[in-house]
Image (cartoon, helix red, strand yellow):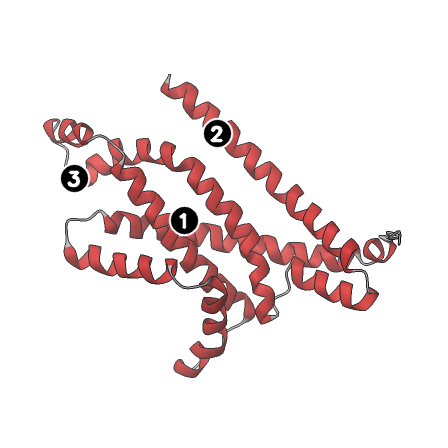
Amino acid sequence: MTYRWNFGPVWENADVLLRGAFGTLRLFAICALAGLLLGLLIGLARQSPRGWLRWPATAFVEFFRNTPVLVQILWFYFALPILAPFEISPLAAAALGISLNSAAFTAEIVRGGIASIDRGQWEAARALGMTGAQAMRRIVLPQALRRMLPALTNRGIEIFKMSTLASAVAYVELLQQGKLLASLNFNPIETYTVIAVIFFLCLLPLVQATYWLERRLGRADA
């Protein structure tokens, strides 16, 4: 039997998908920024010689890396209000779950990037009279960030795609709106095809910008 594609109902309800796309972009912006900043701090703590910084950072990374993001989102949404005297919105629950999970993976990217810098760079900085913090900020971290860029880009892409998990707590994002349209119009193939195209069009500029930045940094090193 030949399937007859019908995108008409999808275009007629484009405003519904646009609202979902806005929700996805908002969640992505929050999680990408929070995950990067928190991951950077935790990654630096993982490299600290001070145990009171290193051990909690290690525990954080291992916990959030080894538990599912969906479970974390659901826990924040349903369990946290039981333990704390306040309600939590779907956006806050999704942002907490995705941001903390992303921070754990970003921390490992940061730790690996710093560890990849030759020890002689540290020794040269010390020979110039720099403290450990100054050597990290001026010498080690700028070099490490260039090496971490591809992995951080992949992390950003994963965050964007993980935003679909927020539909589990009824947050208004692209997949949630797509489910609504598909159930109303009985056209899941067309609806999810359009959603896939929207995701592709949103992510492609991010990936291309990263490639451009990598080429620029590569020429700067030459």
The amino acid type of the residue labelled 1 equals Leu
The amino acid type of the residue labelled 2 equals Leu
Q: Earlier in the sequence, mark 3 or mark 2?
A: 3
Residue contact at pointers 2 and 1, CB within 8 angstroms: no
Picture quadrant of residue 18: bottom right
- How far separated are the C-alphas under marks 3 and 1? 22 Å
- How far separated are the C-alphas under marks 2 and 1? 17 Å
> Residue 43: horizontal and vertical position, in percent?
30, 49
Picture quadrant of residue 81: bottom left
> Residue 152: horizontal and vertical position, in percent?
43, 42
Identify which residue is drawn at 83% across, 64% down.
185
Crowding near the residue tagged with mark 1, few <14, some 14–19, many ≥20 C-alpha atoms within 10 Å: many
Please state, as top left, top right, bottom left or bottom right, where the C terminus lies in the image.
Answer: top left
Q: Residue furthest front?
A: 1
> Residue 163: horizontal and vertical position, in percent?
56, 57
Q: Earlier in the sequence, mark 3 or mark 1?
A: 1
Q: Earlier in the sequence, mark 2 or mark 1?
A: 1
| Above/below status of 10 relative to 171 | above
Identify which residue is drawn at 30% across, 52% down.
42
Residue ID for mark 1: 36
Identify which residue is drawn at 19% across, 49% down.
48
Residue ID for mark 2: 213
Determine whether, in the image, residue 24 is placed left or right of residue 145: right
Determine whether, in the image, residue 24 is placed left or right of residue 7: left
Crowding near the residue tagged with mark 2, few <14, some 14–19, many ≥20 C-alpha atoms within 10 Å: some
- Give 204 or 18, whichever is nearer the viewer: 204
Residue ID for mark 3: 132
Q: Residue furthest top?
A: 222
- How far separated are the C-alphas under marks 3 and 2? 28 Å
